[in-house]
Amino acid sequence: MQGPLPYDIHRLIRHLTFPAWLLLSLWCGAATASMDAAPDEKLRQVLVQAIEDSSSFPDHFEAEVWLLDMSNRLRSRIEDDHERISLLKMVHHEASRAGLPPELVLAVIEVESNFDRWAVSSAGAQGLMQVMPFWLDEIGRPDDSLQDPRTNLRLGCTILRYYLDMENGDLGKALARYNGSRGKTWYPRRVMKALSTRWYRQ
């Protein structure tokens, strides 16, 4: 059995900037399972509600500061300025909507797809956050595309939030559920490493 994760939720809170810390402090738990064998009916309902939510959030000064900072960090992976800024705005919006620190979502994307919106795993998971396509059928939106960044981020963030709730705020366990590796720590460790080495704001 491997040792405890190198970064627990309390250390994550201490290192995030104020707006992200505030979001994190409001967590009651997690988001959604993307790899479970049988669809979770409660999760399906959460996803239906999420996909129908068209509310918008105003961009605040801190969000713009975040955007410039993260843009510089992401430049090596996405060279096109317009594409990079557009993606970061979506990440900030969808993460904030789900009550997740945007930095955490960026770390998940890095590990899951390395920011390749066209990525498809051997298990069939698709897009930036590697969401399983059966969820589109489950929520009655089979014509939507998981290669569309906004759709992928909306579902992925909702799923992660759902699992965090399910695990009573235990980020390591929630990440393992998200990846389909419940009970193991290799995936949470990879996400935390990405978070601590690239996406933490000093």
Image: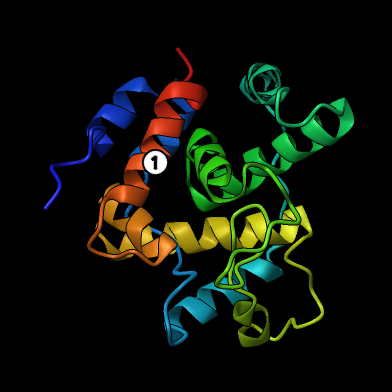
Total number of numbered labels? Answer: 1
Q: Specify the amino acid type for callout 1.
A: Arg
Q: Residues within 10 Å of mark 1 (few under 14, many from 20)?
A: some
Which residue in the rendered view is the most extreme toward the front? 122
Residue that lies at the very extreme toward the top in this rendered image: 202
Q: Nearer the viewer, residue 75 or 153?
A: 75
Q: Position of residue 134 (x, y in %)?
A: 61, 82
Whether residue 64 is situated above or below residue 154 in the rendered picture: above
Image colouring = rainbow
User: Which residue sits at x=64%, y=82%?
Assistant: 139
Q: Is residue 83 left or right of residue 17?
A: right
Q: Secondary structure at mark 1?
A: helix
Above or below, 36 against 162 in this view is below
Q: Can you tell which quarter of the image residue 91 is in?
A: top right
Task: List the residue tagged with mark 1.
Answer: 190
Could you tell me residue 63's position as x and y percent?
65, 26
Q: Is residue 135 visible?
A: yes
Residue 178 is situated, as x and y percent measured from the top left of the image, at 42, 61
Task: Locate residue 29: give its quadrant.
Answer: bottom left
Q: Residue at x 75, y 83 (%)?
A: 142
Q: Quadrant of the C terminus?
A: top left
Q: Residue at x 76, y 56 (%)?
A: 118
Which residue is found at the position 39% from the left and 67% from the top? Answer: 180
Q: Left or right: where does residue 161 sit relative to residue 105? A: left
The location of residue 185, given as percent across then percent down, is 26, 51
Examine the rendering and report whether any part of residue 169 can be seen: no
